[in-house]
Amino acid sequence: VAGVALILNAASDTFMLSLLKPLLDDGFGKTDRSVLVWMPLVVIGLMILRGITSYVSSYCISWVSGKVVMTMRRRLFGHMMGMPVSFFDKQSTGTLLSRITYDSEQVASSSSGALITVVREGASIIGLFIMMFYYSWQLSIILIVLAPIVSIAIRVVSKRFRNISKNMQNTMGQVTTSAEQMLKGHKEVLIFGGQEVETKRFDKVSNRMRLQGMKMVSASS
């Protein structure tokens, strides 16, 4: 259902772009203004279709994403329940909590984002190429020649995204560990006057998380 809605959403965008030429040529360039009568109705219909398909696709993808997160967390929790004591001795509690809460959420978000990109953007590209070949096959050939360069750039950006996402997951584990250690050992921190040390350590990992987030924003821009 989500895939069909995404394809219809992309088709509505492509069809709306294809209406620009008849609107400019027949609507404003000629004395026959009948196109100005039916064009707004078509545009309104396309906008309604786009809104409906956008809602349906977002709802379905969010539903599937929520189910994926729930399943991953249940399996991960059950897997950890069966691990030996040595496993927990080697891993910090914050890191394990981050895997259950943050990492599973990120995996589901990345999967849903990839689905949207592949289906909707793929359908949009196909529709736009068909439209370009219809109007100018010469320009289409030029774009096809440039496609490998664009794919290389996308591959580089995707690799950077993966590295930043991995660093964010590790940093989130450090943030959770720092907070968890402070909460569990709050009395000891007060007794030995370690508030400033714990605050500086938490500020350090929090700032590292902020910097990783800014790197993600920079890469996405």
Image (cartoon, rainbow, N blue to C red):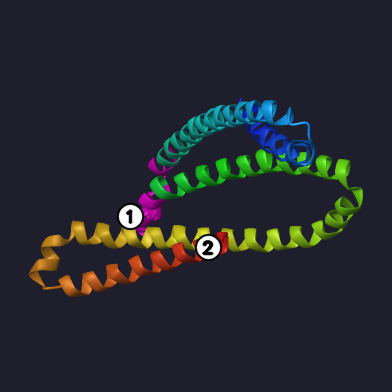
Front residue of 21 and 55: 21
List x then y, in percent, for residue 34.
Answer: 74, 27
Q: CA distance from mark 1 to mark 2?
A: 23 Å
List x then y, in percent, for residue 127.
Answer: 77, 39
Question: Which quarter of the rendered picture does the C terminus lie within?
Answer: bottom right
Mark identifier at residue 164: 2
List x then y, in percent, for residue 71.
Answer: 47, 34
* Residue 67 sits above or below residue 221 on the image: above
Left of 198 or right of it: where is 141?
A: right
Given the current orientation, which residue lies at the most extreme left position? Answer: 191
* Amino acid type indicated by mark 1: Thr
Q: Which residues are magenta?
A: 78-99
* Residue 146 sits above or below residue 2 on the image: below
Read off the residue under disc 1: 93
List x then y, in percent, for residue 65.
Answer: 50, 36
* Residue 82 sits above or below residue 160 on the image: above
Question: Which quarter of the rendered picture does the N terminus lie within?
Answer: top right
Front residue of 33 and 22: 33
